[in-house]
């Protein structure tokens, strides 16, 4: 007898959540049992109305108590995040941390794409963050994993590639993506796009630290070295014209149209593990800066013996339509494909270092008919 599918709740039906919903309906080992939405416009819709795929009688709801009362093995948790440190007093991101504690305490496992939880050592109060989640997991006998594509998969690629290098002196990951189609202008504005250089505050750099600062610590944990500190460097390109991006962000002439930043973990005072981003609001922004392939993508560089480099171009024919859309679709795919491993893992906060290698599941001809 075949094992029963894992029962899954999709929490959040935004840009990435819609892709995740589609993948759940496609996945032969998963059964959709609930959908949590956040707007009145989406409430009561069939799941298939949201993602335009498959067949399901499950309808969306904004009722959190109704969702929490469902029998489910796992929640794919994708709320909108302010991209700030959830452990800073008064942080708007503290709301999702409290909500995660509530979900995990009910006995439901969680896979979430929230980037700041990829590790905890970079957070203002990482020890409390870890303790809260582990205590909730202890109460519910549940497990939580933070993952995605960057962070969440590009770091897995870097760690996996290091296994073929005998001596490593530095590892660098790169995201080079056009964000112009991202449909949440306020998030882009918080990161500094469309702002004057004088408005590129420490708050914007705080977003960078909170979102990607966990990756050096996670890689360092896997490689068995201690991180001394994080170094954050940034640069910007000013737009030569005024325009409104397809996603809705207004970029005026002389404001920031492209950003590049590095978050580096130092060991013995030297950068060892760095996360590098070059993000444009349109392909004509900062054309002199590097790219991957024709439309952007991801890169991993390892200095050592022998040196190792790999490029992963996105925006390929047959994809979601752009490098950004592909990256969001892959974030969703990563989360959905992690469900089985997380459900079967021992309770507690986990990273990819704690789980077996994760791949997708292909439907048989009978299942897909």
Image: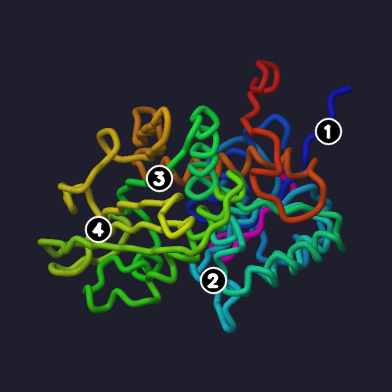
Here the colouring is: rainbow
Give x and y (percent) for residue 147. Answer: 59, 49
Secondary structure of the residue carrying numbered label 3: strand
Q: Real-space Cα distance between discs 1 and 2? A: 38 Å
| Residue 32 location (% of width, % of height) | 71, 44
Q: Say above or below: 202 vs 158.
A: below
Q: CA distance from mark 4 to mark 1?
A: 48 Å
Q: Nearer the viewer, mark 2 or mark 3?
A: 3
The residue identified by callout 1 is: 4
Give the Cα distance between marks 3 and 4. 20 Å
- The quadrant the N terminus occupies is top right
Q: 231 or 30: nearer the eye?
A: 231
In primary-sequence order, the first of circles 3 and 4 is 3
Would residue 352 be found to the left or right of residue 329 on screen? right
Q: Secondary structure at mark 4?
A: strand
Q: Which residue is mark 4?
A: 258
Q: Residues within 10 Å of mark 1 (few under 14, many from 20)?
A: few
In which quadrant is the C terminus drawn?
Answer: top right
Left or right of 169? Residue 250 is left
C-alpha separation, residue under disc 2 versus residue under disc 3: 23 Å
Name which of mark 2 and mark 3 comes first in the sequence.
2
Q: Secondary structure at mark 2?
A: loop
Whole-Å distance between the Cαs marked 2 and 4?
23 Å
Nearest the viewer among 368 and 28 is 28
Q: Position of residue 86 (x, y in %)?
A: 58, 72
Residue at 77 percent across and 67 percent down: it is 65
Task: Point out the stretch of residues depicted in magenta.
Answer: 32-43
Q: Which residue is mark 3?
A: 172
Which residue is disc 2 drawn over? 85
């Amino acid at each position: 007898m075949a094992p029963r599918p894992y029962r899954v709740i999709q929490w959040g039906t935004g840009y990435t959540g819609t892709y995740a919903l589609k993948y759940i309906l496609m996945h032969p080992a998963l059964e959709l049992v609930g959908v949590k939405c956040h707007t009145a416009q989406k409430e009561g819709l069939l799941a298939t109305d949201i993602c335009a795929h498959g067949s399901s009688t499950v309808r969306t709801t904004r009722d959190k108590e109704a969702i929490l009362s469902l029998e489910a093995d796992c929640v794919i948790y994708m709320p909108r995040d302010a991209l700030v440190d959830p452990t800073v007093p008064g942080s708007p991101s503290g709301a999702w941390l409290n909500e995660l504690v509530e979900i995990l305490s009910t006995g439901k496992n969680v896979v979430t794409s929230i980037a700041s939880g990829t590790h905890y050592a970079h957070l203002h109060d990482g020890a409390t963050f870890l303790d809260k989640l582990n205590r909730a997991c202890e109460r519910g006998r549940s497990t939580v994993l933070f993952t995605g594509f960057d962070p969440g998969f590009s770091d897995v690629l870097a760690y996996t590639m290091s296994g073929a290098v005998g001596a490593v002196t530095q590892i660098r990951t790169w995201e080079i993506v056009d964000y112009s189609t991202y449909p949440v202008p306020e998030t882009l504005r918080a990161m500094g796009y469309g702002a004057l250089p004088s408005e590129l505050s420490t708050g914007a750099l705080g977003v960078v630290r909170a979102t990607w600062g966990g990756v050096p610590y996670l890689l360092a944990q896997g490689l068995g070295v201690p991180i001394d500190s994080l170094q954050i460097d940034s640069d910007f390109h000013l737009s030569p014209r005024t325009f409104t991006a397809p996603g809705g962000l207004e970029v005026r002439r002389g404001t920031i149209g492209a950003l590049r930043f590095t978050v580096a973990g130092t060991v013995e005072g030297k950068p060892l593990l760095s996360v590098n981003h070059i993000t444009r609001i349109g392909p004509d922004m900062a054309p002199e800066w590097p790219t991957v392939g024709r439309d952007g993508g991801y890169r991993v560089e390892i200095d050592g013996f022998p040196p190792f480099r790999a490029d992963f171009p996105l925006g390929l024919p047959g994809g979601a339509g752009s490098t950004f859309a592909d990256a969001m679709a892959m974030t969703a795919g990563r989360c959905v494909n992690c469900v089985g491993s997380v459900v079967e893992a021992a309770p507690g906060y986990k990273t990819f270092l704690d789980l077996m290698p994760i791949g997708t599941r292909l439907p048989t001809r009978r299942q897909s008919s």
